[in-house]
Amino acid sequence: ANYFHVPRRQPCRDFRKPLIVMSPKNLLRHRQCVSSLAEMGPGTRFARMIPDAGDALVAPDQVRKHVLCSGKVYYELLAAREAKAKETGAPSDVAIGRIEQISPFPFDKVKEESQRFPNAEVLWCQEEPKNAGAWAYVKPRIETAIRETTGQRPRYVGRGPSAAVSTGYAEVHKREQEALVQEALA
């Protein structure tokens, strides 16, 4: 639904900024990346942040980790969390929030979510190397948003700094991807 709303919202804004959508094409055909017609109907709008609406989640005050992410890594985190919950038969204590708009940053939405999970460690997870993704931009903004609620600093989960955005080897990439998902949910 956000892909539907974002180009409709752009010309109606009272300021002019370029619209940059940074998303892989495979999300356009991902099985879980779907919306109902109701999410595109009257009274709906672009969601700057999509909070965790997982049914298999412990009580908000018992959530241990609050993982913030953007893009397709969300679906990998969600699949791993669901597999772990299915394996253990227990609800998950890791909440996953999607930041859909990096700039301007949704301070209010991140603050609301940190208030919802007061005891959770806040993480930023990205699949890009540390020096290539949104981490450098979002870190101070997440700190500002959660300063009043938890006072903690977000922790980075992802690949280390690298001159290249990819290893060039599918097997190494797959191992790194599995490692970052496991670290985020551990």
Image: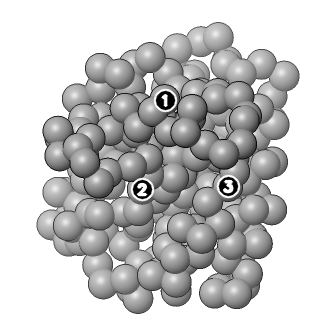
Q: Are marks 1 and 3 in contact (CB under 8 Å)?
A: no
In three-dimensional space, the C-alpha distance between marks 1 and 3, rounded to whole angstroms, equals 18 Å
- Of 165 and 26, nearer the camera is 26
Amino acid type at image mark 2: Ile
Place of residue 117 in the rendered image (x, y in percent of width and height, measured from the top left): 47, 81
Task: Quadrant for the N terminus, please.
Answer: top left
Place of residue 156 in the rendered image (x, y in percent of width and height, measured from the top left): 69, 55
Q: Earlier in the sequence, mark 1 or mark 3?
A: 1
- Please, is residue 155 above or below residue 70 in the view? below
Q: Earlier in the sequence, mark 2 or mark 3?
A: 2
- Please, is residue 121 above or below residue 183 in the view? below
Residue 105: image tag: 3
> In the rendered image, which residue does mark 1 sit on?
7
For the point 71% across and 21% down, the residue is: 165
Residue 43: image tag: none
Crowdedness of circle 1 by 10 Å Cα count: few (<14), some, many (20+)?
few
> In the rendered image, which residue does mark 2 sit on?
50
In three-dimensional space, the C-alpha distance between marks 1 and 2, rounded to whole angstroms, equals 18 Å
- Of 149 and 176, nearer the camera is 149
In three-dimensional space, the C-alpha distance between marks 2 and 3, rounded to whole angstroms, equals 13 Å
Q: Earlier in the sequence, mark 1 or mark 2?
A: 1
Amino acid type at image mark 1: Pro
